[in-house]
Image (tube, rainbow, N blue to C red):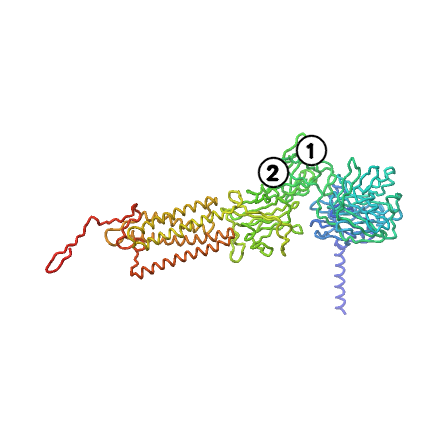
Amino acid sequence: MAKLQSFLLILLYFVINLCICTKSDPVSTRSCAQSMTSLLNFTSQFVMVQHQLRGSFSIINNCSFRISEFDMLPGSSHVHWWGAVGDDYENLTSGFIISDDQLNASTYYKNDSFTVSLMNNVTWDKFRVVSVWDSSMASDFGHVMLPNSDEAPLNSSTETGLQPTMFENCKVLSDTYRLRWTLNEKDNVIDIGLEGAIGIQNYMAFGWTEPNREHDHMLHADVAVTGFNEEGIPFADDYYITKYSECIMNEDGTFEGVCPDTMYNASVSNDLVNNTRLVYGHRKDGVSFIRFQRPLKSVDKKYDWDIDVTSKRTCIWALGLIKPPDSIRPYYLPQNHGKTYGHVHINVSESVNDCLGPLDAEDKEDQELVIADKKEPIIVTSGPALHYPNPPNPSKVLYMNKKESPVLRVERGVPVKFSIQAGHDVAFYITSDPLGGNATSRNGSETVYTGGPDAQGVQSSPKELMWAPDRNTPDEVYYQSVFTQKMGWKIQVVDGGLTDMYKNSVLLDDQQVNFFWTLSDKSISIAARSEKKSGYLAIGFGSEMENSFAYVGWVDVNGTGRVNTYWIDGMDAQSLHPTNENLTYVRCKSENGVITLEFTRPLDPNCNRKERQECNNIIEPTSPLKVIWAMGAKWSLDHLTQSNMHFVKSNKPVRVSLIRGSAEAEEDLRPVLAAHGFMMFLAWGILLPCGILAARYTKHLPGDIWFKIHVYSQYSGLAITFLGLLFAVAELRGFYLGSAHVKFGILTILMGCIQPVNAYFRPKKPDNESSSSKRIIWEYVHMYVGRCSIFVAIAALISGMKHLGDRYNDENTRGLTWALIVWVSLGFVTVLYLEYKERRNGETIVRSNWVLGNGEEEDADLLSSNGKHEDKDSGEIMEVQLEPVSGRYTVI
């Protein structure tokens, strides 16, 4: 029992200490009782500012709020719940984070609901604005205004708390077009919102058809035509359709076509005829939104249809371009809608909501574009902020060439000149910081590319500033003011200036493709740009597409630029074999259908040529590179078919001299090369071998016939060799050692030239019968160099035939090659027969026989002009006398 009491006392002690610690912890002691806030049950809708943000906001207690029906496009990784004292620029930019619950940057919020908790040190009385805030861009996506403590809390039924973008119903009309509405029978009106991911020059139309009409729904339809004028101001007008045409005036002064109601009843007050009243409109993230009201029962019974809220009615809709008013026709003219139209059956009293998530436009950038021209300066001024792309913003922003905060596009390598006339309180600079205003070094990591505190001027005394972006400049930088944040906007740094980025460029065949390159020690950077629109651009290295290495650039369905490599061994889709070349700095883009591809590759792939075909794709800078091209409608990663084939291609290759930076169309040099080959065959296949055979096998003939045949055939063969060499070099306009044929040929010519020089320095035969060592060495050199030159010449002839066949894919060269092999074989058989014949006649083959001939002729002067033999012992006369000595005869 004592032990139990002791245990209970210890347990009580720990419980008391735990309670004391809990009371001392501010995190644990915070109360979220509903009675602690006067804003309990406050409900309002978000003001849409960016990223198509919509939703309902409700305060549920002292430290949390509820978000429902929440839509938002993905933002950056720095999107927070933000608090500020006011919704103006100064207050929002000086606000603070109010919750640790960060919004997911990669999520499409689609009609979501969730609860958000305030941070421990944040209370509702510290701010009046709750914003969805991107801290990296100081950007407000949307916000809610809280009432003051002395104001009555608003709720969902209070009209003041409703925003123009929120409706009770929503219906999808197409992938890019939605209809929203709220019915208010009490006031005899219906609020309609039209929302489309369309261009700013397009209209959005919606209306009711003539009752009981079952076809041609647009005739006699009562529609509202909405859009934005050239200044970006929204409009909504009441139209009536009497004909499928633009609104035209007849000779009698009447109107027909798609015309405003005011044109049909010009004598009636505009307020009685135009029953469409604009409420609100904006253009954000590439999406147009117009809200308007129209009566359920109209006073205009001729050109307006009443809306029966108890039954379904057929409604029509359309999207298309629109012409603005002019002095002749002071009204908007909707153009032909093409295929973007339709009809739908709607009962406006039924609840409908099939719009899941926000509209997402492909092109979210509505800002005007200024493209820098190195010949004309860009005028930088300042003016009022009307449509600044990154709210909130100061009241004064930068203008470029009279356009408010446009996107400026510059090209790497192209100098840009700025004429700064924005005033002495605006210092212009180009920075990596999207906010600018870094007069006090707010951002220590900021990179300033040009400009600064001194870059300021006025119209009467402008400041000139030059800037040349290079390859190290990021793809996106910003022009801003040094002293005030968020006055400027984006600069797109693109690689369009290919002539400035690459050292050499030529036009390929038909002048439809530009080819650019820059050589380095071990690699080459290549770019190609087409001059016409296409789905893909391909360039190849080779004389034609078959047996070539190809590089294909295209933009896939996701908008990603790709460059793939192929080996092509045929003329159909199955003959394209993907390769895996080592490409770096790969880029491909399409601008208005014009393809530009870029890549860097090694000159020598330096891999196993037997295992991988692309390893044979070696670029030799000293040799001309044959380049061809093709363009087609579409390309894909796999499943290539005939539809992927080109619709236009080069007619012939262009030989590009990579070192000289020039190009010329490749001509058909087969006749030239054939003449060169015949001359070399005549010299090394007939004349020179015949001269060698004559020196070996015809010395038994009387006189010096063998000598004449030997000398004349050798000199004739060498002369024809030099003529053939000069002929080929002159026609090919270059002398390159890249191929095996050229290497064999040069070696053959060098060995052939050694022989006459070698014969000129032949040592004379000594008086005694035995030859000197110099004579023996000379004989061996003369003999073996002559033999080897013939074998090397045969290799040069065969490799030359192969080179000709590879160059032109000529099947006839195979037959000629076999004919050459047969000829060489016959020559070899002939030599064997002659050697066999001499052995059979009992003649002994000795060393001197191969070079000088037999016995008495070995002193012949092979280089003498008369070719006669000289007897070195001619001064001594041998006499033979017979004398009888002891019955014998003695020879003296």
Mark 2 residue element: loop
- What's the amino acid at mark 2? Pro
Is residue 128 shown above or below 693?
above
- Whichever of labels 2 and 1 marks the residue nearer the N terminus, that label is 2
Dividing the picture into quadrants, the one containing residue 409 is top right
Horizontal side of 614 relative to 378 (left or right) equals left
Residue 142 lies, in percent from the top left, at 76, 47
- Assign the N terminus to one quadrant of the image: bottom right
| Residue at the image position 69 percent from the left and 46 percent from the top | 136
- What's the amino acid at mark 1? Gly
Cα–Cα span, label 2 and label 1: 24 Å
Horizontal side of 212 relative to 111 (left or right) equals right
Q: Residue furthest top?
A: 460
Q: Residue furthest bottom?
A: 1
Mark 2 packing: few (<14 Cα in 10 Å), some, or many (20+)? some
Residue that numbered label 2 is attached to: 415
Which residue is more in the foreground, 415 or 759? 759
Which residue is more in the foreground, 317 or 498? 317
Residue 492 lies, in percent from the top left, at 65, 43
Residue that numbered label 1 is attached to: 423
Horizontal side of 759 relative to 888 (left or right) equals right
| Residue at the image position 79 percent from the left and 37 percent from the top | 329
Which residue is more in the foreground, 512 or 778? 512
Proximity of marks 2 and 1: CB atoms separated by less than 8 Å: no
Can residue 67 be seen here? The reply is: no
Is residue 748 shown above or below 10?
above
Can residue 105 be seen here? The reply is: yes
